[in-house]
Image (tube, rainbow, N blue to C red):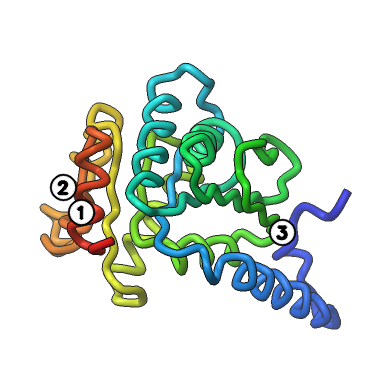
Amino acid sequence: MEKQFLIDDFKMGESWRLFKILGEFVEGVEVLHDIGPAVSIFGSARSKPGAPEYIKAEEIAALFVKNNFAVITGGGGGVMEAANKGAAEAGGTSVGMNIILPFEQKPNKYSNVNIEFNYFFIRKVMFVKYALAYIIMPGGFGTLDELFEAVTLIQTHRIKPLPVILVGKDYWTGLLDWIKTCLLDEKRLSPEDFDILQVIDDPKEIVKAVKKIVMV
């Protein structure tokens, strides 16, 4: 088994590892450069088939495919599996960008374009580089990480603005209320920063909101 703590293990004299990092970047670009318009869908790896968010992720992904988008996920189980399944069964491009972890993450069988990464930061670049929108389903730390990464890049003008859509009003309301109370009201955010986030539950309205901005 490969060493788990890859960043911590980056020591003086191991500059050769930079070539492995570069190789992962090259592979990602080579595989994804011609997938066309795409959305990245995020959510819990622990959601089970039949769960409401699993079913909705399938539906959202299928609708995006029918509207000429590819679908990109982290390639694992749960919501990621559901989105890959919905995209593949709708006849579209279903991208799974799996991260090699010692637990939990295993590639699902529904992605028809597959890439494996050792480094989270390279995978993050691929998500944001090739997505025209971020669709955020209920999830845990990994989902929150991707959410706030995208919002920060948009806020700081490191990437072009893209729709960041939270799916599941009941799930996200507590977080949004906290952001309003502890960040916006305390002037740790500007109103336009908060406006980066949208909450939309209806799959058709989600696709409509993305198409309105990206004009696909």
- Kindly state the secondary structure of the residue where label 3 is placed: loop
Three-letter code, disc 3: Asn
Q: Which mark is residue 116?
A: none
Classify 139 as above or below 64.
above
**In this view of the protein, which residue sits in the foreground, 96 or 145?**
96
Mark nearest the camera among 1 and 3 is: 3
Q: Which mark is residue 180?
A: 2
Q: Which mark is residue 183?
A: 1
Q: Residues within 10 Å of mark 3 (few under 14, many from 20)?
A: some
Residue at 71 percent across and 46 percent down: it is 101
Q: Quadrant of residue 8?
A: bottom right
Q: Residues within 10 Å of mark 1 (few under 14, many from 20)?
A: some
Q: Residues within 10 Å of mark 2 (few under 14, many from 20)?
A: some
- Kindly state the secondary structure of the residue where label 2 is placed: helix
The image shows residue 69 at horizontal and vertical percentages of 39, 54
**In this view of the protein, which residue sits in the foreground, 115 or 42?**
115
Answer with mark 1 or mark 3, whichever residue precedes in sequence: 3
Q: CA distance from mark 3 to mark 2?
A: 36 Å
Q: Which mark is residue 118?
A: 3
Residue at 26 percent across and 46 percent down: it is 207
- Kindly state the secondary structure of the residue where label 1 is placed: helix
The image shows residue 203 at horizontal and vertical percentages of 27, 36
Classify 184 as above or below 24.
above
